[in-house]
Image: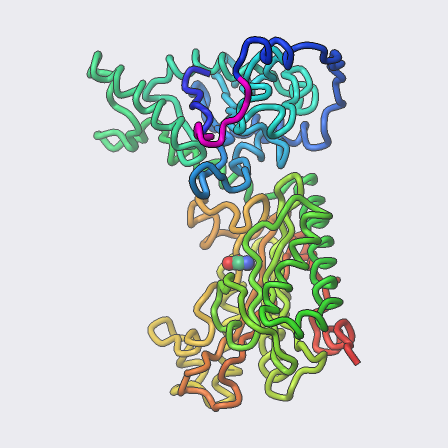
Amino acid sequence: MADQKAPRATTNRSTTPGSDTFKDYISSQWADRPDVLPEPREQAPFAADRRARLSALHPGTRLVVPAGSAKVRSNDCDYPFRAHSAFSHLTGWGSDTVPGSVLVLEPTADGHDATLYLRASAGRDSDEFYANPEIGEFWIGPRPSLTQVAADLGLAARDLADFEAVVSTVDAETLVVREADPDLTRRLDAVVEAAAEQSPASAVGDVTPDDDGTPGRATSADLARDLSELRLVKDAYEVAQMRQAVTVTGKGFTDVIADFDDIVAHPRGERLVEGTFNRRARADGNTVGYDTIAASGDHACVLHWTRNDGVVRDGDLILIDAGIELDSLYTADITRTLPVSGRFTDVQRLVYEAVLEAADAAFAIVRPGIAFREIHATAMRVIAERTAEWGFLPVSADESLKPDHQYHRRYMVHGTSHHLGIDVHDCAAARRDLYLDGVLEPGMVFTIEPGLYFQPDDLTVPEEFRGIGVRIEDDVLVTADGAENLSVGIPRTVADVEAWISRD
Ligand code: GLY
Ligand code: MN
């Protein structure tokens, strides 16, 4: 591809021989590789259906959905590559996506033609093969052939070099998933801007609505919104992946409990919690869907404690918020708060039971047709009632629940639920009408995760409550006539949690 950047290795690190003799030698005497074509992967027809739904939303418009590239961590080292969620959703390509690939939906008379552009394998006669640490086969492994990818994903596949023809013909009406590959977005913008300079009439760009108030041309923001909304209701493949992600996540929690003796003995026990969980993620899935939160003692009062450098003490609670992301990139998002000793103290149990009551009350109302907001409202009523009963609020629970009061939210500042799927906070660009103010439909998957967090220096609560943080988070599927708690098999009642840990 024309914009292929030079490898980042500096001359200080480059010891690859450059002689013609070496080049000839390393390019020769390799066995042919048979181009064995796989059967289409299980998700291929589901991805085709998602593309058809997207196509129907944008007739006549070219859509560009890049996978993105690895992001620099420092100098010439990258973070592990992870394809953009919209790209994976529309192609079915997950952890094995070739970085830099781009899906293009080209409009036709009756829909769109989908083409996947990816960097074709370099021949053994190229110096990329052995001398390019970023993409060379000797360095990061061989790439699949175009025909293999086409068979695997059930999609037309072309060399990324051919994508240049798309780049050179983008116009202001082309819609792009802009954040997926910022370098590519800049290149596409430059082409559109150059065309606009030559012919100002075409320089309308992403405008909606039109000046006269009629709905205008769709924008890339509209595309992002539609891609989020396409995922609000999961298909059968996605639901099966979510079940699998939850199952292996449960195993990760069990692994951590089995290591509690070592964890307590270690000066950075939280790191061992993270390490043990992440080992399970690597073994049974792709990786973790977000940074594991291993928050012991009063670290549990920090909602996103990911530093994980604290000691884990017998007698404390440890809040573990973690989820395994599968090769398909679907992730679970589970929180369990565990007594490290295996037994809750009286005050720990009191707080835990209140959070569990809030979670159960919220789950009990979930069914098609109710408002998403009601889940949070139901959990908050329990949180307000319990904290009022304990004397922590300056007013009654009813008063506190009034929109302009909300005293109880001091102890739970976060929301109760978010959609979950290929992103841990899935569907983030969906319209408020369909998400926060939306109505539940069968196939939606979201978390229910109430908590109570009494900061170590909170003077509104008695001393014995200070430094206790509890969150219980489950992953819930809306069914035809109710709901299923996908993570109900991961112990969550006091008795079941104590039996699960049982360190005596
Ligand atoms: N699991 C982290 C969160 O939902 O924010
Ligand atoms: Mn969550």
User: In this rendering, would 286 be left or right of 74?
Assistant: right
Q: Position of residue 323 (x, y in %)?
A: 62, 54
Task: Residue 32: name its quadrant.
Answer: top right
Residue 12 covered by magenta stretch: yes
* Residue segment shown in magenta: 9-17
Asked whether the viewer can see residue 370, the reply is no
Above or below 318: residue 94: above
Query: Main structural element of the magenta stretch: helix, strand or loop?
Result: loop
Q: Position of residue 499 (x, y in %)?
A: 78, 75
User: In this rendering, would 256 be left or right of 473?
Assistant: right
Quick one: 254 or 59, which is closer to the camera? 254
Residue 210 covered by magenta stretch: no
Residue sitting at x 43%, y 32%: 181
Residue sitting at x 66%, y 40%: 327
Q: How many marks?
A: 0
Above or below 107: residue 79: below
Task: Residue 135: name its quadrant.
Answer: top right
Q: Position of residue 197 (x, y in %)?
A: 20, 16
Q: Position of residue 116 (x, y in %)?
A: 56, 20
Above or below 237: residue 343: below
Residue sitting at x 48%, y 66%: 303
